Image (cartoon, rainbow, N blue to C red):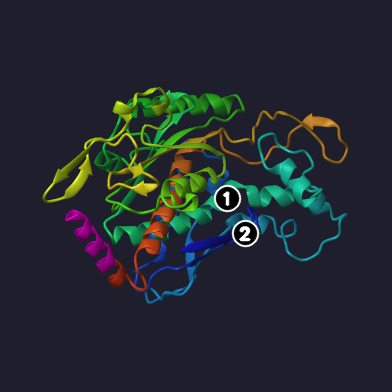
Amino acid sequence: MRFLTAGESHGPQLTVIIEGMPANLFLTAEEITTELLKRQGGYGRGRRMQIEKDTVEIMSGVRNGYTLGSPVTLVVKNDDHKHWLNIMGVSPIAESAQEQMKRVITKPRPGHADLVGGMKYDHRDLRNVLERSSARETAARVAVGAVSKILLQQLDIHVMSRVKEIGGIRDESNYTPEEIAAGNDLNDVRCLNETVAAQMRERIDDAKKAGDSIGGEVEVCVVNCPPGLGSYVHYDRKLDGRIAQSVVSINAFKGVSFGEGFKMASMPGSSVQDPIAYNETTGFYRLSNHLGGFEGGMTNGMPIIVNAVMKPIPTLYKPLPSVDIISKESYQASIERSDSCAVPAASIVCEHAVAFEIARAVLEEFQSNHMDQLKTQVERYREELRHF
């Protein structure tokens, strides 16, 4: 399974093409839209979320509610595009057009793709960079992940997420997958501890008043994945490596780990490795899950635990010094509409990025022309492992 996305932040729409979905998966636009709306929520979001009401349209690959096995095309309209018709239109426009000149960006924002993207593609209007590098594209990735989650649920594999830290305020508790699932949408910061959640909101308010932004850490949990997804035989077949690449490719994500993660640097091996046990009914299992569900680049049957760090958003209402790419004079960087904190929404994006990689690994591992075939293959494989 693979996908491509297209579209700009203020363009007419985001378009997604997903190739490789099995036939006969029940799929509706409403199910995907439900996940898109989660991405738009969260404490600390900016005005863009009040403008856009993300809904998806299924344009191909589905008939009468069921996938056909052909490419699935999804479209998410940008409601705000009506205010950008001349600026973001595809037809040629005179360079001196007054309306266009108001929106030309020549002052790159530190920490954003603006300057490097302009240098790489020789753009003298940095809007040509920021329109695509914008986190608006993550709506398309959530749509892909939503389809992936629907597929995985048919195989009794479930993906969920939570927020662990925002701006130095941290929930130190360890939660079971059941607790995470029950509290998935508990509040607007997606933190399971209400006392910590209140402190997170205060920290976000402080950042907003200061014209600043803050980041944080999220956790994604995947339960009931069969052992053996991924492979140890080549670097690009290791599933934890694929997940790490996918997560860090999300806008503003700068770090990823599994299980105990970076804590393992200071832990002895006896406290890191997960002891193996055997039960005649269920087969092999681990007595702990410090490694986060992976050994040798393969799932080991324990819950997959992915920890990911998001940096503060680079667009600040108290902008940092920058240099105009045309005049080469020092200025304060351009201000674009932004969020003081997008960590709760980012946890949704991360959850769906992980879901896609798990679904892709499943479809690579098992024959999957249609859903009944896939379900049979997965259940047969689970039964084989129970008797290994």
Residue 189 coordinates in the image, percent (x, y): 41, 35
Residue assigned mark 2: 7
Nearer to us in this view, 3 or 46: 3
Residue 378 drawn in magenta: yes
Residues rendered magenta in the picture: 375-388
Nearer to us in this view, 204 or 348: 348
Residue type pointed to by label 2: Gly
Residue 383 coordinates in the image, percent (x, y): 19, 60
Quarter of the view holding residue 267: top left
At numbered mark 2, what does the secondary structure look like: helix, strand or loop? loop
Nearer to us in this view, 102 or 118: 118
* In-image side of 320 versus 232 (left or right): right
Residue assigned mark 1: 136
Residue at image coords 57%, 50%: 136
Nearer to us in this view, 141 or 43: 141
* In-image side of 285 versus 365 (left or right): left
At numbered mark 1, what does the secondary structure look like: helix, strand or loop? helix
